Image (cartoon, helix red, strand yellow):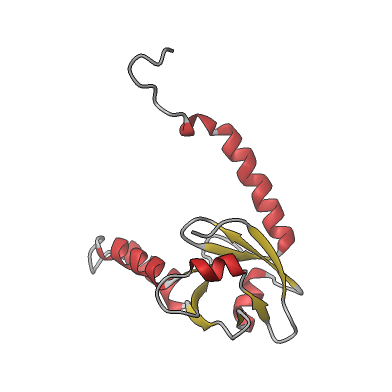
Amino acid sequence: MFLGTHIVGVDAKGRASVPAPFRAALRGEAGVVFVWPSWRGPYLEAGDRELLAQYQTLLAARGAFDDAREDFEYAIFADARALTLDDTGRVSLPEDLRAHAGLGAKAAFAGLTDRFEIWAPERLAARVAEARAKAADKRALLSRPRGPGEGP
């Protein structure tokens, strides 16, 4: 499971260290992480082969000629990269991916249980503030249904 936020350096060649807890959570191919530009905003999405297999299964259920399926396949799979971790746990983030996320000398890795995202730290801070505000407004969605005899 990918948890927490970790700020790491990005060197001039685009190399960044994948946080150790994230490396430990990668399933499937040892030393490989899949990364693609998010279609939802200026950040990168990342995960392991199992995550991509889950997406593939969900999309396959839509049928071979479904337009939405094709759009998601382009948005996720067409630009995904299999990045190999070096002996120290670093990956080389390609220039176009760094540009999409606006990455400079720092990158923020944000764990989101089954996947993680890579952001410019200041953009992630704004996104977290937005998410917390929305979550506060929607807190009733997390209410546990009361069982028999638990009162009002």
Please report the residue visible at 55 percent of the width from the left and 66 percent of the height from the top. Answer: 22
Q: Position of residue 62 (x, y in %)?
A: 26, 60
- The reply to whether residue 22 is in sight is yes
49 vs 126, nearest the viewer: 49
Q: Position of residue 72 (x, y in %)?
A: 39, 66
- The reply to whether residue 37 is in sight is no
Please report the residue visible at 44 percent of the width from the left and 71 percent of the height from the top. Answer: 48
Question: Where 19 sits versus 129, above or below?
Answer: below
Q: Position of residue 12 (x, y in %)?
A: 75, 85
Snapshot quadrant of residue 44? bottom right
7 vs 67, nearest the viewer: 7
In the rendered image, which quarter contains the C terminus? top left
Please give left or right for residue 35 compared with residue 128 in the image: left
Q: Position of residue 111 (x, y in %)?
A: 56, 59
Snapshot quadrant of residue 89? bottom right
Question: Where 121 sits versus 13, above or below?
Answer: above
57 vs 66, nearest the viewer: 57
Please give left or right for residue 66 compared with residue 78 in the image: left
